[in-house]
Amino acid sequence: MTRLFAVFVIGLALCGVSSATAKGGDEEAVAMVRKAVAMVKKEGRQKTFAAISDPANTTFHDRDLYIYVYDFNGIALAHGNNPKMVGQSLIGLKDIQGKFMIKEMIAVAKTKGSGWVEFKWPNPVTKAVESKTGYVEKVDDFLIGSGAYK
């Protein structure tokens, strides 16, 4: 009985470890953005945006991490989680707390070149609305971003 309990406890501990790694982290989000920025510079917008929007491309899709691209008018140029957003004006998009997150991302990219924006957004894995920190970098007249759920 004690041996069975020990196996059960170890199993629970291992489940906790695997669920902790189910979310991408801030460093991984930054690395993914930098890969997308490098690809735009090397291979151009069209090829990069197509790769970002392809869910089979694991360079730009990893667990709950994905890339999004917006021009400075708030038009989605590429979106790794929801391709239906591409071509849409999302400048007025608000999170559940009323925060204009796309406007804030644009402001950060234009004024600082790169940085973080905090907002609440549905996690594509859990489907729950969670806190998210989005990292964005300015590239020409658009931004490339990704974010980590907390």
Image (tube, helix red, strand yellow):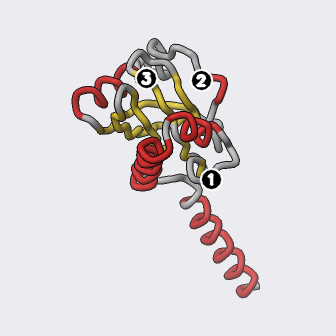
The location of residue 57, given as percent across then percent down, is 64, 49
Q: Secondary structure at mark 2?
A: loop
Q: Position of residue 83 (x, y in %)?
A: 65, 29
Query: Along the horizontal axis of the image, is 74 left or right of 124?
Result: left
Can you tell which quarter of the image residue 1 is in? bottom right
**Callouts 1 and 3 close, C-beta under 8 Å:** no
> Which residue lies most toward the front here?
43
Q: CA distance from mark 3 to mark 2?
A: 11 Å
* First in sequence: mark 3 vs mark 2: 3
Q: Quadrant of residue 37?
A: top left
Amino acid type assigned to the residue bearing label 2 in the image? Val
- Residue 92 seen anywhere in this rendered image of the structure: yes
Mark 3 burial class by Cα count in 10 Å: few <14, some 14-19, many 20+: many
Q: Amino acid at mark 1?
A: Thr
**What label does residue 86 carry, if any?**
2
Q: Is residue 131 above or below residue 141?
A: below
Q: Are the two marked residues, 2 and 1, in contact with CB atoms closer than 8 angstroms? A: no
Identified at 33% across, 38% down, the residue is 116
In the rendering, at what x and y percent does residue 26 appear? 40, 51
> What's the CA distance linking mark 2 and mark 1?
19 Å
Q: Which residue is mark 3?
A: 71
**Which residue is at the far left?**
111
Q: Which mark is residue 58?
A: 1
- Amino acid on which the number 3 mark rests in the picture: Asp
Among numbered discs 1 and 3, the one appearing first in the sequence? 1
Dot 3 falls on a residue whose secondary structure is: strand
**Of the pair 138 and 133, the residue shown nearer to us:** 138
| 114 left or right of 21 in image | left
Q: Position of residue 69 (x, y in %)?
A: 48, 31
**Does residue 145 lie above or below 16 as drawn?**
above
Q: Which picture quadrant has residue 48? A: top right
Circle 1 sits in a helix, a strand or a loop, which is it?
loop
